[in-house]
């Protein structure tokens, strides 16, 4: 087992955000985390990366408890793409991506790191942004740069928190294709919190559905994304279709108004 | 953007990046040359009239005594113990204030952070006022400087202590810093209210700041502090870049954010405390030198930190030279001069930028 989370509990003062969450991530798979706003998706990802410290529960990575690992060791194994990113001071896109090399070198970068950064610029398709200032970019461009920084980290696992929330439809697909090809070609794994049910259905190998800080269901896309589960978790009536062997979800209406619209 | 970006080749990007880094190195070298020139010019200026030849004979006599003669005992005294020590002291003090300001702005993610806005300077001012008005203090021989140093350290330890207790977030540090600034200003006002006018005048003169107390002993102390602090800060400069992308990102890239923030606050406060203790309050350099630097070379701290130090040194020492020579024999307060020289430069740079703040 690659990454294992067992009985994770996290609270902000008195509010319990995560309630005994357990999950297992295999090598070379994309695990999509779905759930409504406030279900605890981002908190779960932050706990796994030790950005937040859970009150109880065990997280192991290749059978090592992450509490016994230094931050630098974790950074060598886990890459993290936050939802939003800001920088009050100017930094070029090139320098921003170069930061991803930090876990692999001492206090300065080497020519090898420059080369790696150039490769990543090409891979993510943002070569022409290289010398632009990060703060001048659009939200979608910034999101790609932040993904590129996590890729420059060259980790075995990627934690993605809403990696496509600011992107247009083409860029959403491009980003997901990049992640999928890395997972399948390089054998890395990814945990991805995401709002778009159909993007998750299409690209995730397994789906973990969360509600109010606990796991509601987990399994392959067809078994989890059922009309019953979607009604229970999101309060939405939906029709599930089969599109290229993947579920395609057509949301119809909120449950409480159902009599008016779903006749 | 997006997939059809074949227009620009990777070699071209690498070239651009290399020349981008090259420009920053050139800026660094230009600053170093300017400092050498400043030292060379400043030692020839002053109330006691010495020719350029005399001044340089005195200087080179130290290194090559067989070739250069000392023109007179007075010249030797003036050049070594007054002019040269003073200009070097200005450069070192400015360097410390410049780099401390740059570090504080980055780790607190606030462009307004500086030794002054964090209350370190006003705490030092209170320490000095206590010594001048009441005659109370630590260290008998260095009463005023010692007191200023101790109080500057107390205030910054207080901020770091609160941060340790409540989490080292930028907001907590800035808020406690500003609160401390108001507290010590109030304390100084209270002391002045009950003090006799001569003592108040002494406090005002101390607060205005001056390079007049420079000496080789103090220069030695300051040089030692800088020799320890500057390399540590510059060694951490990549981590400072990462921290300004956000605490979460920095943690995910392996940086121990709280420890780095505490460490760098302690080091920069120590530097500021040892400078302010000798010079009095000089508020402006720590705020403006880093901004001037970033406007010229961008935000990469590997270059921003050393360049801010040099810009700070140039500004402070340059302002001191002008302050001494503009209406001799009157020496204008150094704080006034740094503001008069720095502010037009600062506004020029703001107006010159096409886009936004940077």
Image (spheres, rainbow, N blue to C red):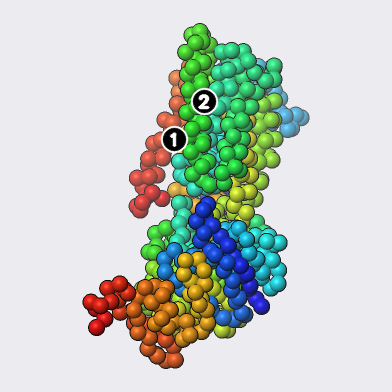
Residue at 69% from the left image edge and 17% from the top image edge: B141
Of mark 1 and mark 2, the one earlier in the sequence is 2
Horizontally, residue B114 falls left or right of residue B67, namely left
Q: Residue B235, position in %: x, y?
A: 65, 50
Vertical relation: A54 (above or below) A216: above
The answer to whether B270 is drawn above or below residue A88 in the figure is above
Is label 1 on the same chain as label 2? yes
Inspect this view and state whether residue B8 appears.
no
Residue at image point 50% right, 66% down: A213
Q: Residue B342 carries which label?
A: 1
- Residue, disc 2: B184
Task: Residue A79: name its quadrant.
Answer: bottom right
Determine which quarter of the picture holds residue B211: top right
Chain designation of label 1:
B
Q: Assign a secondary structure to mark 2.
A: helix
Residue drawn at (46%, 73%), measured in percent from left and top? A34
Quadrant of the image for the N terminus of chain B? bottom left
Element type where label 1 sits in the image: helix
Can residue A68 be spotted in the picture? yes
Across and down, in percent, residue B57 comes to 66, 27
Q: Distance between the residues labelled 1 and 2?
A: 26 Å
In the figure, B190 relative to B159: above or below? above
The one nearer the camera, B110 or B36, is B110
**Furthest residue in direction left, as rendered:** A260
Residue B33 sits in quarter: top right
Label 2 Cα neighbours within 10 Å, binned few <14 / some 14-19 / many ≥20: many
Q: Where is residue B86 in the image (x, y as percent from the top left)?
A: 60, 26
| Residue B82 percent across, percent down from the top left | 62, 22
């Amino acid at each position: 087992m690659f990454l294992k989370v067992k009985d994770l509990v996290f609270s902000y003062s008195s509010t319990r955000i995560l309630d005994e969450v357990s999950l297992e991530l295999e090598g070379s798979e994309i695990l999509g985390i779905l759930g409504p706003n406030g279900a605890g998706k981002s908190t779960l990802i932050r706990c796994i990366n030790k950005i937040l410290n859970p009150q109880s529960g065990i997280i192991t990575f290749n059978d090592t408890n992450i509490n016994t690992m230094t931050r630098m060791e974790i950074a060598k194994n886990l890459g993290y793409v936050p939802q939003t990113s800001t920088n009050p001071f100017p930094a070029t896109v090139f320098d921003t991506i170069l930061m991803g090399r930090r876990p692999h070198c001492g206090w300065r970068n080497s020519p090898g790191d420059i080369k790696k950064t150039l490769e990543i610029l090409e891979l993510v398709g943002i070569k022409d942004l290289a010398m632009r200032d990060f703060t001048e970019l659009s939200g979608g461009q910034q999101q790609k740069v932040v993904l590129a920084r996590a890729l420059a980290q060259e980790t075995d696992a990627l934690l993605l928190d809403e990696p496509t929330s600011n992107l247009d439809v083409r860029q959403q697909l491009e980003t997901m294709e990049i992640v999928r090809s890395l997972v399948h070609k390089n054998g890395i794994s990814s945990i991805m919190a995401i709002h778009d049910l159909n993007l998750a259905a299409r690209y995730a190998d397994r789906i973990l559905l969360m509600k109010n800080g606990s796991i509601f269901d987990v399994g392959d896309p067809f078994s989890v994304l059922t009309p019953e589960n979607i009604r229970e978790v999101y309060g939405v009536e939906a029709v599930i279709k089969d599109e290229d062997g993947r579920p395609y979800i057509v949301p119809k209406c909120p449950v409480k108004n159902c009599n008016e619209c779903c006749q | 953007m997006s997939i059809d970006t074949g227009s620009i080749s990777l070699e071209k990007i690498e070239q651009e990046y290399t020349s981008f880094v090259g420009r920053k190195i050139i800026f660094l070298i230009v600053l170093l040359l300017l400092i050498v020139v400043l030292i060379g010019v400043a030692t020839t200026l002053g109330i006691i009239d010495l020719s350029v030849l005399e001044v340089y004979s005195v200087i080179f006599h130290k290194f090559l005594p067989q070739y250069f003669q000392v023109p007179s005992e007075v010249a030797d005294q003036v050049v070594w113990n007054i002019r040269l020590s003073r200009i070097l002291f200005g450069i070192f003090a400015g360097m410390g204030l410049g780099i401390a300001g740059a570090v504080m702005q980055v780790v607190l993610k606030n462009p307004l952070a500086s030794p002054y806005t964090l209350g370190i300077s006003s705490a030092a001012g209170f320490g000095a006022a206590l010594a001048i008005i009441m005659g109370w203090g630590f260290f008998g021989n260095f009463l005023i400087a010692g007191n200023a140093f101790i109080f500057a350290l107390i205030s910054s330890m207080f901020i770091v202590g609160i941060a340790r207790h409540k989490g080292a977030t930028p907001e907590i540090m800035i808020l406690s810093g500003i609160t401390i600034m108001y507290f010590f200003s109030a304390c100084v006002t209270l002391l002045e209210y009950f003090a006799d006018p001569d003592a108040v005048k002494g406090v005002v003169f101390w607060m205005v700041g001056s390079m007049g107390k420079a000496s080789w002993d103090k220069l030695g102390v300051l040089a030692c502090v800088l020799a320890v602090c500057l390399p540590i800060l510059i060694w951490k400069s990549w981590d400072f870049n990462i921290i300004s992308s956000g605490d979460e990102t920095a943690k995910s890239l392996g940086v121990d954010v709280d420890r780095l923030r505490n460490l760098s606050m302690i080091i920069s406060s120590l530097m500021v405390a040892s400078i302010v203790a000798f010079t009095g309050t000089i508020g402006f350099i720590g705020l403006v030198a880093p901004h001037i630097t970033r406007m010229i070379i961008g935000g990469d701290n590997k270059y921003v930190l050393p360049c801010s130090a040099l810009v700070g040194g140039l500004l402070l020492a340059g302002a001191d030279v002008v302050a001494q020579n503009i209406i001799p024999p009157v020496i204008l307060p150094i704080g006034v001069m740094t503001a008069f020289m720095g502010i037009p430069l600062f506004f020029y740079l703001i107006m010159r930028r096409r886009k936004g703040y940077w």
